[in-house]
Image (spheres, grey):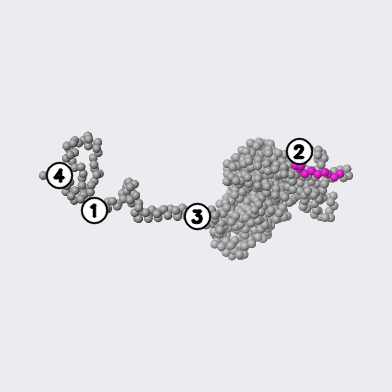
Amino acid sequence: MVEEEAKSLPMELSEKGGVENNGFVQNEAFDDKETDTSSQEEMPKTCFVDVAPAATEELVLKPYAGMPKEVLLKFSSQAQYRVTREVLFWLIIAAAVVLVCATIAIIALSPKCLHWWQAGPVYRIYPRSFKDSNMDGNGDLKGIQEKLDHITYLNIKTIWITSFYKSPLKNLGYGAEDFYDIDPMFGSMSDFENLLAAIHDRGLKVIMDLIPNHTSDKHRWFQLSRNRTGKYADYYIWQDCRQAAGSVAPPNNWVSVFGNSSWQFDDVRKQCYFHQFGKEEPDLNFRSLAVQQEIHDIIKFWLGKGIDGFSFSAVKFLLEATHLRDEPQVNKSQNPESITAYSQLYHDYTTTQVGMHDIIRSFRQTMNQFSSEPGRYRFMGSDGDEKEDIEATMMYYGTTFIQEADFPFNFNLINMKNLSGNSVFEAVNLWMKNMPAGKWPNWAVGSPNVARISSRIGKEYVNVINMLLLTLPGTPVTYYGEEIGMQNIASEDVSEERTNSDPVATFPEKSPMQWDGKVNAGFTEGNSSWLPVNSDFQSVNVETQRNWSNSTLNLYRELTLLRSDELPIHRGWMCYVWNDSNVFVYVRELDGLERVFMMVLNFGQESTIDLTAVVPSLPSEAIIRLSTNFSNAGKAVNTKLIKTEKGEGLVLEYKTAKPVHTMEAFQGNCFVAEKACYSSAFNLLYMNC
């Protein structure tokens, strides 16, 4: 009975219209091994299952994981999946377009990044006086390398090393005997290469002096020129000398910078050669293209070595008038025969001649050949030094379309005849109001050629001068030792014997760097130094001041940190707020940033001022961010009654929604070099405010 029902079941399912399912058909190999013929005949070959049509439709339309390609394609064409896919596709495209546009907008709106020579202070080193490494009493290149940690401690970004070419060291080595070699006093070319590598390893840059105007009379070119050898015959400026009363008379009344005639008779050539400086430093003839090419080759040589820039000195002397007329006298009634001083003539024919700027621009073009590599821009500075003609100095910046120097070095703060709040304001304003739009300012308060700050204006003003230097817009230049307040060596420190035998002893601002309180101030381990150290070295030295919180050194370091950390001081607006005989007050601001820094600097006597009367929107209270007296830092001051002592400086910080540079009353008192605006929403800088 059961067997009969089993036999009839397939027939009944078939009659009901079942769906054929081949999912369980046995493997042929299995059939051969496991079943016999009689069994196969008895087993049904197909199985029919009764499935409702609605259930069949639902099963077909519902996707499942692991679908084969053929099944997947059936579903992908359905509207619900096609629309979703297209929406996702266009969302991705739109997001990509938005991202590209945002990137382009950020790049287009972002202000130009500051170059390395704009980003931090420049530290100027006179190598003979910085550090002696071999105990001969003279500073050298290895000595500079030994003290690089001091420079990084100061947050200095660039080192400027004054002339170290092979030289007879007349006029302190500014007349080179060989532009392609290092003077043995300072070391070897290998020492220089090691120093350069060590500087770059610390992320620092190095620039060096180049004085193209003249050479030493020991230079090979001059020796060949005086013998009229080939092209070298015209490398220098030679003229026949007039005979007068049995002696040689110069061709005209031109006077050397150091005094007396700028013409020197040469016994070999039997002519006079021209020298704007010492007689041992004959001027090159820059009207000769061969001479110009020699200087270009020198530039290429040192840039090829890897230096990051040049400071070109004495460039206003490159050309002289060819007509050789006498220069006009300052005092027309003076006897012409008595003129011996440089200041007694107007130097219309020996400085800043037509074509001089073209030569400097050609130097720039050569340097640009080495500036194409990203991050390797080569800096070019020049010393316009036109004390009486600020417009002539500004010409060294170049024009809108023709690049020249990145900046001419600014000595306005050095050249002040007296110190007061007004004189400092005038020195700063003179540069800022004459500087071409879009150019970058710079400031120096010390140099190898002028008395140190302490000796020039007084020890009590060293800290406030450094505060001024490091909070003004632009690039500050610090002469070695000014960060610890070094003074000139006193005359009693220089022996009579040394003064008579070594003329450089008359330059007391070049005394050895004072590193510690040990013998010779840590400058040398030898028995003596080329110049004596200052007698105050036991208290004024790097080691002592690093351990003294209220020292000149640590204030200098805090100021450089403030400069690098705070955008308004780094690249913001500067606006003059107030100046009188005692104080100079200015602010540093940035569009979009409510935080403002106000500098109140005292260059006179004790003073009290009400700044709310000058800036009505000024908050009633400000915080002292930095002070020349460290104990005052962090204190609050009443802006209606700000008191400063003689030589005191304050960096005040406050917040305001109405910065000074937006006020109509101060429009003529505000300057910005590289304008930038801050977005607090995106924490980035942009250009169009």
The residue where tag 3 is placed is 101
Q: Amino acid at mark 4?
A: Lys
Q: Amino acid at mark 3?
A: Cys
Sequence-first tag of 2 and 1: 1
Residue mark closest to the camera, 3 vs 1: 1
Label 2 to label 4: alpha-carbon separation? 127 Å
Q: Is residue 523 visible?
A: no
Circle 2 SS class: helix
Query: In the rendered structure, which segment of residues is drawn in magenta?
Result: 225-243
| Side of 132 where 226 appears, left or right | right
* The N terminus: image quadrant: top left
Circle 4 SS class: helix
Q: Which mark is residue 91?
A: none
Residue mark closest to the camera, 2 vs 4: 4
Circle 3 SS class: helix
Sequence-first tag of 3 and 1: 1
Label 3 to label 2: alpha-carbon separation? 63 Å
Residue mark closest to the camera, 2 vs 1: 1
Position in image of residue 482 (x %, y %): 65, 48
The residue where tag 2 is placed is 230
152 versus 468 height, above or below: above
**Looking at the image, which residue sits at the far top?**
33
Quarter residue 587 falls in: bottom right
The residue where tag 1 is placed is 53
Q: Amino acid at mark 2?
A: Gly
Position in image of residue 138 (x %, y %): 68, 39
| Side of 108 where 248 appears, left or right | right
The residue where tag 4 is placed is 7
Sequence-first tag of 3 and 2: 3
Label 3 to label 1: alpha-carbon separation? 55 Å
Q: Which residue is nearer to you in this view: 149 or 68?
A: 68
Label 1 to label 4: alpha-carbon separation? 26 Å
